[in-house]
Image: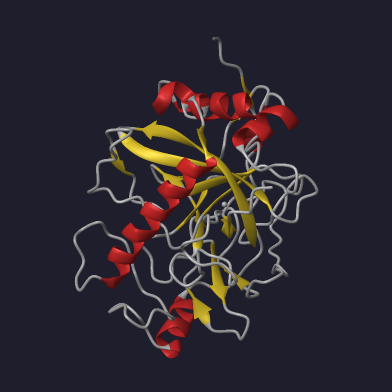
């Protein structure tokens, strides 16, 4: 039986129906806390992260990629409105994506309603925009690597879980490589039976095809053409995924250990990386949180968010 490729998964999706934020209780992982700031469904809403002892941290830089009992030589781990890690803000909180001054929401493209998996990212990974991938012939998208967690439980925004890596898909988004790791929560009832992308194909028929369809069409309601996928839209296996994750982890290391910025705009402020010139004190990290707007009542969401879109093939 294949050993689990386990990594921390940070869920960045926002539910349209709830504004609750929960702190996960993870086996063999540090417990993380979250603190919302601003008003949900507004441009100033943020979710900041704290360690178990209440110190402010960056989910991008301070949450380890690998589970505590794994090393980088092990088969690696992975992780998850359109919400995103604010890579260009101090401490990199989760925020709702904004386009042309308006909040972005994931369109309902029939038969898919919003996201069809838990969507998030792997901490301590970075798709380097100065690196051209040998396989896709495109550069990285300047973000942490994305993860589609296919388990049965819906994750809360900001939840951190361990996942088993199963495979990977390569989206080419406006000329940039945007990897999508396929993974499952190690505590999911199906986790022990899913050890490869072929297992997913057998045990969850239609799920991979739906994933390809979703990534091809999710920007069409915005008036854009269908997205292109590398490798003819075929998924690569777990071993391939692990090598991609290792590479993006090494790119991240180079990013946070460098002596000066190179123009990507990424904020590398962190509270735990001893060798990083961007490490800050606990007081400096706390000051970032204190400067953010106080948490307030959520704003109402337009009914347009639940609109269905039908695409003619």
- Of residues 39 and 80, which is closer to you in this image? 80
Q: Is residue 227 visible?
A: no
Question: How far from the left and from the top, in percent, is residue 162?
Answer: 64, 60
Q: Is residue 178 left or right of residue 208?
A: left
On screen, residue 238 versus residue 206, left or right, reads left
Q: Is residue 76 left or right of residue 136?
A: right
Residue 115: horizontal and vertical position, in percent? Answer: 62, 38
Considering only vertical position in the picture, is 215 above or below 122? above
Camera-side residue of 266 and 308: 266
Residue farthest to the top, as pictured: 313
- At 57% from the left edge and 37% from the top edge, which residue is drawn? 106
Please say whether residue 3 is visible from this viewpoint.
Answer: yes
Q: State the quadrant of the C terminus.
A: top right
- The vertical placement of 113 against 155, above or below, is above
Relative height, residue 263 to residue 205 (above, below): below
Q: Position of residue 92 (x, y in %)?
A: 44, 66
Near-viewer residue (291 or 142): 142
What's the image's color scheme? secondary structure
Determine the residue located farthest toward the front in the rendered image: 1
Residue 201 in the image: above or below residue 23: above
Q: Quadrant of residue 54?
A: bottom right
Residue found 36% across the figure and 83% down from its top: 274
In the image, taking residue 170 as reference, residue 252 lies left or right, namely left
Most extreme residue toward the right is: 189
Image coords of residue 196 (percent x, y)? 62, 39
Number of numbered callouts drawn: 0
């Amino acid at each position: 039986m294949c050993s689990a490729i386990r990594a921390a998964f940070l869920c960045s999706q926002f539910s349209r129906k709830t504004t609750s934020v929960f702190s996960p209780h993870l086996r063999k992982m540090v417990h993380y806390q979250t603190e919302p700031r601003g008003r949900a469904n507004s441009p100033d809403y943020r979710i900041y992260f704290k360690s178990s002892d209440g110190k402010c941290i960056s989910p991008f830089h301070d949450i380890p990629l690998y589970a505590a009992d794994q090393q980088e030589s092990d088969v690696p781990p992975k992780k998850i409105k359109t919400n995103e890690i604010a890579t260009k803000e101090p401490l990199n909180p989760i925020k709702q994506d904004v386009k042309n001054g308006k909040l972005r929401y994931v369109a309902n493209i029939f038969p898919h309603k919003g996201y069809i998996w838990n969507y998030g990212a792997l901490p301590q990974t970075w798709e380097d925009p100065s690196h051209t991938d040998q396989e896709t012939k495109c550069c990285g998208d300047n973000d942490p690597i994305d993860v589609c967690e296919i388990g049965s439980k819906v994750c809360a925004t900001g939840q951190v879980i361990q996942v088993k890596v199963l495979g990977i898909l390569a989206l080419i988004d406006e000329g940039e490589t945007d990897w999508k790791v396929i993974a499952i929560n190690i505590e999911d009832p199906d986790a022990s039976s899913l050890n490869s992308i072929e297992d997913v194909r057998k045990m969850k028929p239609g799920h991979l095809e739906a994933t390809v369809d979703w990534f091809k069409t999710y920007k069409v309601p915005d008036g854009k053409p269908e997205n292109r996928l590398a490798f003819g839209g075929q998924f690569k296996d777990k071993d391939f995924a692990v090598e991609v994750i290792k590479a993006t982890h090494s790119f991240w290391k180079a990013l946070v250990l460098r002596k000066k910025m190179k123009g990507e705009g990424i904020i590398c402020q962190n509270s735990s990386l001893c060798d990083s010139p961007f490490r800050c004190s606990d007081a400096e990290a706390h000051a970032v949180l204190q400067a953010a707007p106080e948490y307030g009542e959520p704003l109402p969401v337009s009914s347009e968010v639940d609109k269905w879109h039908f695409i003619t093939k």
